[in-house]
Each structure stands twice: as C-alpha cells, then as structure tokens.
Image: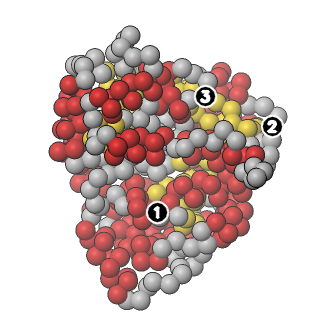
Amino acid sequence: MKNFRATRLAGMPTSIFSTMSKMAVDYKAVNLGQGFPDFDGPPWIMEKAFQAMEEGKNQYAPTVGIYSLKKNIAKTIKKYYDIDRDPDTEITITAGATEALYSTITAFINPGDEVILFEPYYDSHQADVILAGGIPRYVTLHKPDFTIDPDELRNAVSAKTKMIILNTPHNPTGKILSAGELQLIADIANEFDLLVLSDEVYEFMLFDGNKHNPIAKLPGMKDRTITISSTGKTFGMTGWKIGYAICSQELTESIRKVHQWTTYAVNTPGQHAMAYAFSMIDEYLPEFRSTYSRKRDLLYNALKDTDLKPHLPQGTYFLMIDLPDGRFKNDIEAASYLVKEHGVATIPPSVFYSESDEGKTMLRLCFAKKDETLKAGIEKLLGAL
C-alpha cells in the first residue's frame, strides 16, 4: 500500500507533553510535566454550567460565540487594558487557545511565508506554521533572564516575513516581556508591515506585582495584532477548551472563515458559565494569584539552594531549573532518568528550541498542582541529587 500521509506531516513529532504524561503513567510518577492543574477551578463556575444545561442551553452556540461571553471579554479588556473591542465583530470564541492559534495561522500564512518565533517556543506555534506551509525563523530568548537580542530579531526579518508570534507571560520560561522588548517588536512590525500574533493565555497569572501589557496597546499595533487568550488558563478549566481571538474586524473575518470549518462552534453551557466568570473576575483574581504565587514559592524555595538552580518566574505556572553541571548529557537524558529512576515527570525544553542549545541545560516544571503533589515531586527531585 502506498504512503497516504500528507507531506506536511513529515517530521511532525508527537507532542512532548503527551510523551511525558504517558511516561508518568507508565512509571507511576508524580507528574510535574504537562501544564494543567490537577485540581478543579471554582465550583461556582461549574454551578453556572449545570444551570445552563438545566435551562436547555445544550445545542449549537452561534459559531462566533455567545454574545454575553464576548461582551464580558470586551468589558474586561477595556477595564484592565483600556482597549476598546467590538464584541460582535472583533472577538471570536474558539475551542481553546489551541484552535485560535491554528485558525489564525491558517488564515494568514501561505506556503513560503516566514514567521518569526521566539525560542523556547510553545510547540503548537511551530506546528501550526509548518502545517500552513510557512517557514519558521527563530530568535532566542537568552539565559539567564531570557532576553531578546535586538540585532538578532532585526536580522531574522526578510522580504518573506509575514508574522511575528510572541507569548507573554511566556511558556515555558515564566518571563514577562519588558516594555522595551514589546516596543522593539512593535517598531519592527510597523516598519516592515508585519502581523503580530500575541499569545497571552497567562495574562492574569502574574506574581510580585508584575503587570501584563498587551502589545496591541502600542502605537500602530491595534489593527495588526491578533491577541489570543484562554478561559481555561484564567479560570482553571482547561478541559472545557474555551479560548478566544481578538483583532480588527478585517482580520477577524479571515479567522472566522477557518474557524467555521474547524470546530464550527464551542460548547454552549461552558460559554454561559464563562460569561458569568468574567463578570466576577475582579473578585476572583486576588485569590487566584495568591494561590499560584504560594505554589510557585513552595517549589522555588525548595530548590533555590540546591544544584537544581531554579529561575523565578514572573508569570505562568511554570518554573525552569538549570541542570547540575556535568551530571547529564542533556535535558532528554535528565528527564528520562528522573521519571524512570525517581518517579517524577518533567518536560525537557530542548524540544522548544531550533537554533540554540540552551534548552539542553534545563528542565521545565509545572506547579499547577495540589500541595501534596508538589511536595511529593519535590521530595523525588531532591532524592535524585
């Protein structure tokens, strides 16, 4: 039988998150790898979903999302960032941020278009560019502070460049791009007439008084930026898969053309519950941030004086650790050793790099876990030293 697989899938690996989670199950390991909470989000959000189901809101939602959810997202954007967006024409509800990324990249990237990614990149960014026939170009966020080299970014731009993809707060490093770095990206996007896809799913998961600054607020950027975010990350319901894409009406129309043939619509009772959740976001965020800040500190403080030197994250629920010098050949070996021999699963970040070798010196940990999970994982990590 001939090979029926599309050539675009050549070299497309299985997600490292799936690989490590399977190993965690196989070796009965504590899973500090894949980035999702091992506890539920607020029960009052679930109650609203149950209420919506009981009220008969169980059939297809409008393909672009229910109005009340889009309206409350628009209100939140205005209140927190002073950005005006039209709920009808500039906000689209998607099946998680994952679908928003896919629909956006498919809508705008032609075969041969170049797209700049900051490495370590979220692997879905790279995969979607490749599936669209685009050509990824890489700019490294350099250790120890994961900073952008302005010359490196400018040199990555060519006549074929169409889009820059950024992620802030950043998975996997926990870095929040600085005002200067955002301005650098904006200046280049405006100068070379580029689109910017800004993945901001961790926009509310901030620590130590840090602020999130959307690049869409900068001069010239509102109409060339597609902002993507996720109710799953903000409200701890990743399995509901409710994300959204925000951009100008012109750009939105293109994204919706892909979205309508990808998922058509997003689960109806969950949308109604999330519409209510956004109406309560002011009351919700203090406890949300306090919870994750405490979990971050629990993990960071346990490791900061060990050979697993942690990088303190400014946002997200991820923490990067440096591997002990000379102990392992690379991060893949370290991650395999830890899960097989010590029963703790991590993520080797070299799979998120295509240019730099810096990823081979680190591991990514997720602290969106119950305290007992974190403590068990810490005990196993320390036992491996």
- Relative vertical location of residue 48 with respect to residue 93 in this rendering, above or below: below
Residue type, numbered disc 2: Lys
Seen at 34% across and 46% down, the residue is: 25
Numbered disc total? 3
Residue type, numbered disc 3: Ser
CA distance for labels 3 and 1:
28 Å
Q: Give the side of residue 150 with respect to residue 59, left or right.
A: right
Q: Nearer the viewer, residue 135 or 31?
A: 31
Front label number (3 vs 2): 3
In the rendered image, which quarter is residue 192 located in? Answer: top right
CA distance for labels 2 and 1:
33 Å
Judging by the rendered image, the residue that carries numbered circle 2 is 160
Front label number (2 vs 1): 1
Judging by the rendered image, the residue that carries numbered circle 1 is 241
Badge 2 marks a residue whose secondary structure is loop
Q: Position of residue 356 (x, y in %)?
A: 57, 22
Seen at 36% across and 20% down, the residue is: 323
Badge 3 marks a residue whose secondary structure is loop
The answer to whether the residues at label 3 and label 2 have Cβ atoms under 8 Å apart is: no
> Disc number at residue 354?
3
Q: Give the side of residue 113 with respect to residue 241, left or right.
A: right
Q: Where is residue 56 in the image (x, y as percent from the top left)?
A: 41, 89
